Image (cartoon, rainbow, N blue to C red):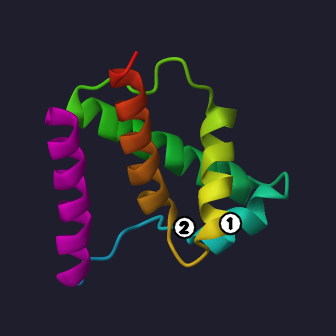
Amino acid sequence: MKTKLSALLCFLALSISSSWGLEYRGVVACGDWVKERKKDSVVNAAHQAILVGFLSGIALATDKDFLRGTTNESLFLWVDNYCQKTPLENIYMAGMHLSIELQIKNKNK
Protein backbone atom coordinates (compact mmCIF):
# COMPACT_ATOMS: atom_id res chain seq x y z
CA MET A 1 0.00 0.00 0.00
CA LYS A 2 2.83 2.38 0.88
CA THR A 3 4.47 1.74 -2.51
CA LYS A 4 1.28 2.53 -4.40
CA LEU A 5 0.79 5.68 -2.35
CA SER A 6 4.35 6.86 -3.03
CA ALA A 7 3.94 6.23 -6.74
CA LEU A 8 0.60 8.00 -6.79
CA LEU A 9 2.03 11.03 -4.99
CA CYS A 10 4.94 11.26 -7.44
CA PHE A 11 2.56 10.98 -10.38
CA LEU A 12 0.27 13.65 -8.92
CA ALA A 13 3.20 15.96 -8.31
CA LEU A 14 4.25 15.65 -11.94
CA SER A 15 0.67 16.17 -13.15
CA ILE A 16 -0.02 19.17 -10.93
CA SER A 17 3.24 20.91 -11.73
CA SER A 18 2.57 20.42 -15.44
CA SER A 19 -0.87 22.01 -15.14
CA TRP A 20 0.63 24.94 -13.23
CA GLY A 21 2.92 25.62 -16.15
CA LEU A 22 6.15 24.71 -14.39
CA GLU A 23 8.99 23.89 -16.70
CA TYR A 24 11.29 20.96 -16.03
CA ARG A 25 14.94 21.34 -16.87
CA GLY A 26 16.45 18.43 -18.72
CA VAL A 27 13.17 16.98 -19.98
CA VAL A 28 13.99 14.38 -22.60
CA ALA A 29 11.26 13.29 -24.99
CA CYS A 30 11.06 9.57 -25.58
CA GLY A 31 11.55 10.11 -29.31
CA ASP A 32 14.84 11.88 -28.59
CA TRP A 33 15.86 9.12 -26.15
CA VAL A 34 15.37 6.45 -28.82
CA LYS A 35 17.22 8.48 -31.47
CA GLU A 36 20.19 9.27 -29.23
CA ARG A 37 20.47 5.75 -27.80
CA LYS A 38 21.60 4.59 -31.23
CA LYS A 39 24.63 6.88 -30.93
CA ASP A 40 27.68 6.88 -28.72
CA SER A 41 27.37 10.55 -27.89
CA VAL A 42 27.62 13.03 -25.06
CA VAL A 43 23.88 13.66 -25.43
CA ASN A 44 23.15 9.95 -24.95
CA ALA A 45 25.35 9.90 -21.84
CA ALA A 46 23.55 12.98 -20.49
CA HIS A 47 20.14 11.39 -21.07
CA GLN A 48 21.26 8.27 -19.25
CA ALA A 49 22.61 10.31 -16.33
CA ILE A 50 19.31 12.20 -16.07
CA LEU A 51 17.40 8.91 -15.92
CA VAL A 52 19.68 7.32 -13.31
CA GLY A 53 19.60 10.50 -11.22
CA PHE A 54 15.82 10.67 -11.43
CA LEU A 55 15.43 7.02 -10.38
CA SER A 56 17.94 7.47 -7.57
CA GLY A 57 16.00 10.52 -6.39
CA ILE A 58 12.76 8.54 -6.27
CA ALA A 59 14.50 5.74 -4.34
CA LEU A 60 15.89 8.24 -1.86
CA ALA A 61 12.64 10.18 -1.48
CA THR A 62 10.56 7.04 -0.95
CA ASP A 63 13.19 5.25 1.15
CA LYS A 64 12.83 2.22 -1.16
CA ASP A 65 15.91 0.43 -2.45
CA PHE A 66 14.15 -0.70 -5.64
CA LEU A 67 17.31 -0.28 -7.74
CA ARG A 68 19.10 -3.11 -5.88
CA GLY A 69 19.95 -5.92 -8.26
CA THR A 70 19.59 -3.81 -11.40
CA THR A 71 22.23 -2.55 -13.77
CA ASN A 72 22.22 0.76 -15.58
CA GLU A 73 22.04 -1.09 -18.89
CA SER A 74 18.93 -3.02 -17.78
CA LEU A 75 17.29 0.28 -16.82
CA PHE A 76 18.22 1.81 -20.18
CA LEU A 77 16.83 -1.19 -22.07
CA TRP A 78 13.55 -0.98 -20.15
CA VAL A 79 13.27 2.71 -21.07
CA ASP A 80 14.18 1.89 -24.69
CA ASN A 81 11.16 -0.42 -24.88
CA TYR A 82 8.88 2.04 -23.11
CA CYS A 83 9.94 4.93 -25.34
CA GLN A 84 9.61 2.95 -28.55
CA LYS A 85 5.98 2.28 -27.60
CA THR A 86 5.27 5.84 -26.40
CA PRO A 87 7.53 8.27 -28.33
CA LEU A 88 5.53 11.33 -27.27
CA GLU A 89 6.11 10.69 -23.55
CA ASN A 90 9.26 11.76 -21.72
CA ILE A 91 11.83 9.87 -19.71
CA TYR A 92 10.46 11.19 -16.43
CA MET A 93 7.21 9.34 -17.07
CA ALA A 94 9.22 6.32 -18.21
CA GLY A 95 11.18 6.55 -14.96
CA MET A 96 8.00 6.78 -12.89
CA HIS A 97 6.57 3.66 -14.56
CA LEU A 98 9.87 1.83 -14.17
CA SER A 99 10.16 2.74 -10.49
CA ILE A 100 6.65 1.48 -9.83
CA GLU A 101 7.35 -1.77 -11.66
CA LEU A 102 10.60 -2.33 -9.76
CA GLN A 103 8.98 -1.54 -6.41
CA ILE A 104 6.22 -4.07 -7.08
CA LYS A 105 8.73 -6.66 -8.30
CA ASN A 106 11.00 -6.20 -5.27
CA LYS A 107 8.04 -6.36 -2.89
CA ASN A 108 7.16 -9.81 -4.23
CA LYS A 109 10.64 -11.20 -3.52
Relative to 59, does residue 82 appear above or below in the rendering? below
Q: Is residue 63 left or right of residue 27?
A: left
38 and 26: which is toward the camera = 38
Secondary element at image label 1: helix
Q: Amino acid at mark 2?
A: Val
> Which residue appears at 14% of the width and 34% of the height?
2
Foreground: disc 1 or disc 2: 1
Numbered range of the magenta stretch: 1-20
**Which residue lies under the disc numbered 1?**
84
> Which residue appears at 67% of the width and 71% of the height?
32
Q: Is residue 65 visible?
A: no
> Which residue appears at 46% of the width and 26% of the height?
67
**Which residue lies under the disc numbered 2?**
28
- How many numbered marks have been drawn onto this rendered protein structure? 2
Q: Is residue 17 magenta?
A: yes
10 Å crowding of disc 2: few (<14), some (14-19), many (20+): some
- Say which quarter of the image contains residue 42: bottom right
**Residue sitting farthest toward the right:** 39
10 Å crowding of disc 1: few (<14), some (14-19), many (20+): some
List x then y, in percent, for residue 98: 46, 45
> Which residue appears at 51% of the width and 48% of the height?
51
Q: Is residue 82 magenta?
A: no
Q: Is residue 72 left or right of residue 66?
A: right
Q: Is residue 4 visible?
A: yes
Compare marks 1 and 2 and give the one earlier in the sequence. 2
Work out which quarter of the rendered image holds the N terminus and state it.
top left
Q: Amino acid at mark 1?
A: Gln
List x then y, in percent, for residue 96: 38, 52
Q: CA distance from mark 1 to mark 2?
A: 14 Å
